[in-house]
Amino acid sequence: MIAGSGVQRERVVSRGSEPRGNSVIVYALISGRSPRIFTTSSGERLRVVRRGTIAAVVSDRSGASSSTANLRRYDRLMRELAARFPALLPARFGTSVDEDELMFILSTRRASLARALIAVRGRVQMTIRVLARATAEDRGIMPVPEEPAGAVTGRDYLAGKARAARAVAGFEPVRAAVARWVRDERVERRGGVSSVYHLIPRSSTVAYRRAVRTAAASSGLRLLVSGPWPPYAFAD
């Protein structure tokens, strides 16, 4: 994984045990007008496979190993594509699929993909790494469970689960400081680090970064902020 980008690795296998046609490497999904074939700054020839208003940027070359050099090359390519196309959903590193299967995906998921592309249009990902603070449980102090104030509905339960998923100790002042720019948020936890991914307008990155650092300094929160990145964390 490239620090701060959220790049992941996955191979997509077509329906059935064997591919039915030519297999392609998928780099990203896009919308809007685009040339059918274009060449990147590094000289790589890419094709655009379209189904209606949704398209995929693909390469006919074979898949690359998940070496550090290839991951960095992938990230450079994603940045170039994000600069070229205003609405882009990066594919996971190493995504390989039969072209007939790709057309099936573009057709059957057209509505959900269109909504996702609308959400990321003109926006970029900012990544905040927050170092965890010691909790009472970490110090060996078990919290006393609270009695529910009243009947808990299914909606209350789901809302509580959603709040818990977003909870990062000490992060609320930062979240409040950047709320005006945030279109969407994702949170991941690994070991002692929480990663908060924000989807914001491309034009707001400088103001966003300044607000994060000011709020973190005021609250004593230790964090690292990076970006702008292509919206890796928002390409479900």
Image (tube, rainbow, N blue to C red):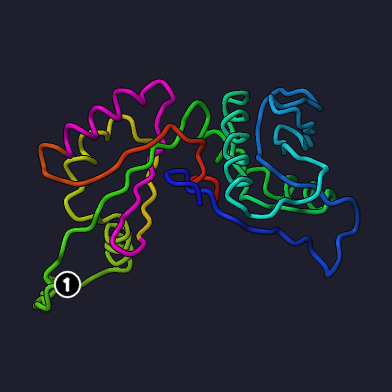
Specify the segment rendered in magenta.
190-216
Verify whether residue 196 appears in magenta. yes
**Residue 147 at what x, y percent from top left?**
11, 76
Judge by depth and name the residue closer to the eye, 140 or 113. Answer: 140
Verify whether residue 60 appears in magenta. no
**Residue 55 at what x, y percent from top left?**
72, 36
Going by the image, does 141 lie left or right of 30?
A: left
**Residue 184 at what x, y percent from top left?**
39, 41
Going by the image, does 130 lie left or right of 197?
A: left
**Residue under label 1:** 138
Residue 170, compared with residue 227, is above or below; it is: below
Judge by depth and name the residue closer to the eye, 90 or 40. Answer: 40
Q: Residue at x 11, y 42 (%)?
A: 219
Q: Residue at x 79, y 31 (%)?
A: 45
Residue 204, compared with residue 213, is above or below; it is: above
Report which quarter residue 204 is drawn in. Answer: top left
